[in-house]
Amino acid sequence: MTQVTEHPVLAAMVRDLKAALGTRLRSVVLYGSAARGDFHAPTSDFNLLLLLEDLGPSTLEALAGPLRGWRKGGQPMPRLFSPALVGRSVDVFPIEFLDIRAAHVVLHGDDPFAGLAVGREHLRLQCERELKEKMMRLREGYAEAEGRPRDVRRLIAASYASFAALFRGALYLLGVEPPAANDAVVRAFCDRAGLQAQPFESAARLRRGDEALTEADPKSVFARYYEQLERAVGFVDRLPQGGGDIR
């Protein structure tokens, strides 16, 4: 963990942000795989959330310089929040905020997620909605692939992390503290939901570029993966509705 968080790319970004924004920069928070200890250099990147004093045009313009170098290095666009926006967004982004709350590293400033409470019903609705939306995109992608092996493999590999994130949210609904690594999250969810884990393991191996799977029939891999995802949607659909916070 220490080696990742002290990466020169992160140090340079924090330095550039402080120089460009001064006191308007309230916090820089690292989240995602690097904060969870699940960072794999070939496929992972650095996810940042910037807490800014305000989100007005002048503040956004001041970000241009730091972001130019950050994006040029292939890193994803940071999430931009103000303190007020964090408070107003808990009901909209419960999965994301729970994920960040569970594993994050404050690189600068105060911790905006300390003591943050997430509503259970908001989380359930997001899990259900996004699972169905991701399944819709998966169907569309498979139709567009027209059975081309390379495209089907890419589709499976690209979708894996998104479904793992939703399974992480579903584990919170089940009262289970999710593991750090995506693969462990998927196994834990499969165990609770009565799903077969093997199709997801194949998807994870494709994401890691496992050469052993390149000779497998991708349509058969997709069919098994798709079947278990359909069952996952049905399982989340049947979860009871209820209020209260997840703390």
Image: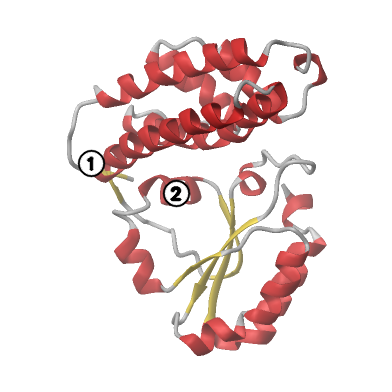
The one of 154 and 9 positioned closer to us in this rendering: 154
Position above or below: 60 against 108: below
The one of 145 and 155 positioned closer to us in this rendering: 145
Q: CA distance from mark 1 to mark 2?
A: 15 Å
Q: In this image, 129 relative to 80: left or right? A: left
- How many residues crowd around disc 1 within 10 Å: few (fewer than 14), some, or many (20 or more)? some
Q: Given the image, on which type of amino acid does mark 1 rest?
A: Glu
Q: Earlier in the sequence, mark 1 or mark 2?
A: 2
Q: Determine whether the residue tagged by mark 2 lies in a helix, strand or loop.
A: helix
Q: Position of residue 22 (x, y in %)?
A: 60, 87
In this orientation, does residue 180 appear? no
Mark 2 lies on residue? 96
Q: To which quarter of the image does residue 38 belong?
A: top right
For the C terminus, the quadrant is top left
Position above or below: 31 against 56: above
* Residue at 78% over, 44% down: 41
Q: Position of residue 194 (x, y in %)?
A: 40, 10
Position above or below: 28 against 133: below
Q: Given the image, on which type of amino acid does mark 2 rest?
A: Glu
Q: In this image, 80 relative to 171: left or right? A: right
Q: Determine whether the residue tagged by mark 1 lies in a helix, strand or loop.
A: helix
* Residue at 20% over, 27% down: 240
- How many residues crowd around disc 2 within 10 Å: few (fewer than 14), some, or many (20 or more)? some
Q: To which quarter of the image does residue 153 belong?
A: top right
Q: Position of residue 144 (x, y in %)?
A: 56, 32
* Residue at 39% over, 33% down: 131
Q: Residue 121's mark?
A: 1
Q: To which quarter of the image does residue 241 belong?
A: top left
* Residue at 72% over, 56% down: 5
Which residue extends farthest bottom? 58
